[in-house]
Image: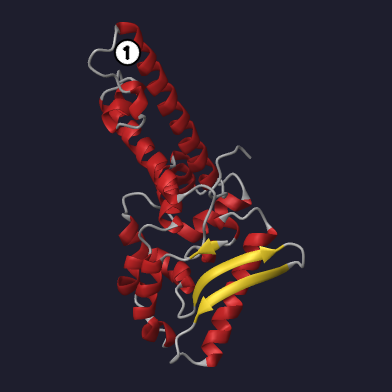
Amino acid sequence: MKLLNADWCKGAQELAPSIAMGRLRSESSARLITGTYLEAWWRCLKFSKEFTQSCRTGIFTSKESFNTFRLFGPLENISFHEWWITKGHLYFSESITTLQVKLYGKCSERKTFALAVDALQDVSSNLAGREFEFWLNQIALLNQGRGLLSEAPLSWPIFKSRISLPAMSQLLSLLEIHDQVIRNAPETKLWQIGEQLRINSQAIPKSGDCASDIADKHKAMGQTISSYLKKGSNLVHNASIGFFPQFSNQ
């Protein structure tokens, strides 16, 4: 089962008249994209050197990676907000509808879908019907494959993964910080980064710890950071070749 964020519902409902008239502006819809899986997907691609290189050369390793490029375009020297205004809204704003999906799930025994929505009273039945069909198609796409957002990109407002947004955001932030630290101070140890960010509180030395305890905690912190960096790198790599969100290797 998946639930739609309450803030999203409120924001989209405020824009319902513009949506219904087909006059939704990228500037007014920009606030709805922050803190979504779409933003996390964008951050993965922005960080990916592989994706950046493919955008520069026009050489892509697979059909999926090229399709990702077609969706996002080149991301160098552009912020998430700027990308939405100039490129992202052209495709992804189709998912901002007056009909608000509250809950959906798959009934495996009967091979059917359960779907709960909020519909505004002043929206025409024709528009509501089209939007309902749109969401039903997106949910079907998610359930036909592995449940990846890359398999149904327009499902981003209702998408939820076992890889939570907070966990994904932490991994991406760690990758960005690590990259910056290593470029500026290549001798920095992983445990030093971990202690600075307080990633694993149990692996932070306390006053009174003996030398062996400190060494053990440094080792534990280094292993924690190493594990997080590996997961984050896998997430970024998979996004760059057209599979998001996914930790495991293809």
For the question of whether residue 198 can be seen, the reply is: yes
Is 31 situated above or below 14?
above
Report which quarter residue 112 is drawn in.
bottom right
> Nearest the camera: 44 or 83?
44
In this picture, residue 145 sits left or right of residue 222: right
In this picture, residue 107 sits left or right of residue 5: right
- Across and down, in percent, residue 176 comes to 34, 38
Q: Residue at x 39, y 52 (%)?
A: 75
Report which quarter residue 25 is drawn in.
bottom left
Q: Residue at x 56, y 50 (%)?
A: 242
Counting the numbered discs, the total is: 1
What is the basis of the colouring in this image?
secondary structure
In this picture, residue 96 sits left or right of residue 10: right
> Which image quadrant: the N terminus?
bottom right
Label 1 is placed on what type of residue?
Ile
- Across and down, in percent, residue 208 comes to 24, 12
> Nearest the camera: 62 or 248?
248
In this picture, residue 137 sits left or right of residue 234: right
The secondary element bearing badge 1 is classed as helix
Residue under pointer 1: 214
- Across and down, in percent, residue 157 comes to 47, 65
- Across and down, in percent, residue 136 comes to 62, 73
> Which image quadrant: the C terminus?
top right
> Nearest the camera: 4 or 191?
4
Q: Residue at x 43, y 92 (%)?
A: 122
**Going by the picture, which residue comes out furthest to the left?**
207
**Going by the picture, which residue comes out furthest to the right?**
110
Q: Residue at x 50, y 92 (%)?
A: 124
For the question of whether residue 182 can be seen, the reply is: no
